[in-house]
Image: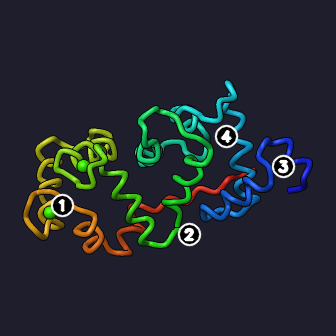
Amino acid sequence: MGNAESAETGLDREEGKRLSELTHFTQEEIHRWFVRFDLLDKDRTGSVGAPYLLAIPDFKGNKFLPLIFRAMDEENVGKLTFERFVRALSAVSSRAPVEERKRFVFKVYDLDRDGQLSATELMSVFHILTSNSIHEGTLKSMCENTIASLDSDGDGLITYDEFKVLIGEADMDDKFTRDYLPTN
Ligand SMILES: [Ca+2]
Ligand SMILES: [Ca+2]
């Protein structure tokens, strides 16, 4: 992508380079994501509401993505800056090292951001991921079993250290990796 085009998208080359270093996207991919993001930033505030981002056709029907965006929206303002948007997509991509993906998935589940996962948090996330299609009782036992299998100190809560040991690399690839690349 040439200078003129980059300037036209409003993302300068230095910023593109910085974000490319911060994420697992190439500078060209960053610029292509920016074109999409910028189109949605109609009020020119530099941030876009999650529902608008989720309406991008590539993301259609993905239940995990609203949670991914929520995890990146640390102040709970319902909006993401471009940097947070590309960092979110990067954190779940297969280009991210497994450790980085695990940390991010933990963050996705930790709805109240206290550094521990509770049965209630797992329930809420499972509810969303299964579109409330699973019977409450079944879901509850799924959560209890998950907690029990991860909770090595038996306090009923899952810390990141407990989480990372038992979630294998294969699990990450199957369940938590989502590759989004900007198409033209
Ligand atoms: Ca928590
Ligand atoms: Ca524990």
Label 3, label 2: how many angstroms apart (C-alpha)? 25 Å
Q: Identify the element where label 2 is drawn.
A: loop
- Residue 147, relative to residue 126: is it above or below? below
Separation of residues labelled 2 and 4 (CA atoms): 21 Å
Is the residue 98 above or below the residue 92 in the image? below
- Numbered circle sitting on residue 95: 2
Q: CA distance from mark 4 to mark 1?
A: 37 Å
Quadrant of the image occupied by residue 63: top left
**For numbered disc 1, what is the local secondary structure?**
helix
> Which callout, 4 or 1, points at the residue further toward the start of the chain?
4
Q: Where is mark 1, residue-wise?
A: 146
Q: Earlier in the sequence, mark 1 or mark 2?
A: 2
Circles 1 and 2: CB atoms closer than 8 Å: no
In the rendered image, residue 146, in percent from the top left (x then y), is placed at 18, 60
Dot in front, 4 or 1: 4
Q: Going by the picture, which residue comes out furthest to the left? A: 154
Q: Secondary structure at mark 3?
A: helix
Q: Earlier in the sequence, mark 3 or mark 2?
A: 3
Marks 3/1: CA distance?
A: 47 Å
Q: Which residue is mark 4?
A: 37
Ligand 1 has an atom within 8 Å of the beta carbon of the residue at disc 4 = no
Lower position in the chain sequence, tag 2 or tag 4: 4
Determine which of the numbered discs, if any, sits on residue 77 in the image.
Answer: none
For residue 6, the mark is 3
| Contact? badges 2 and 4 (CB < 8 Å) | no
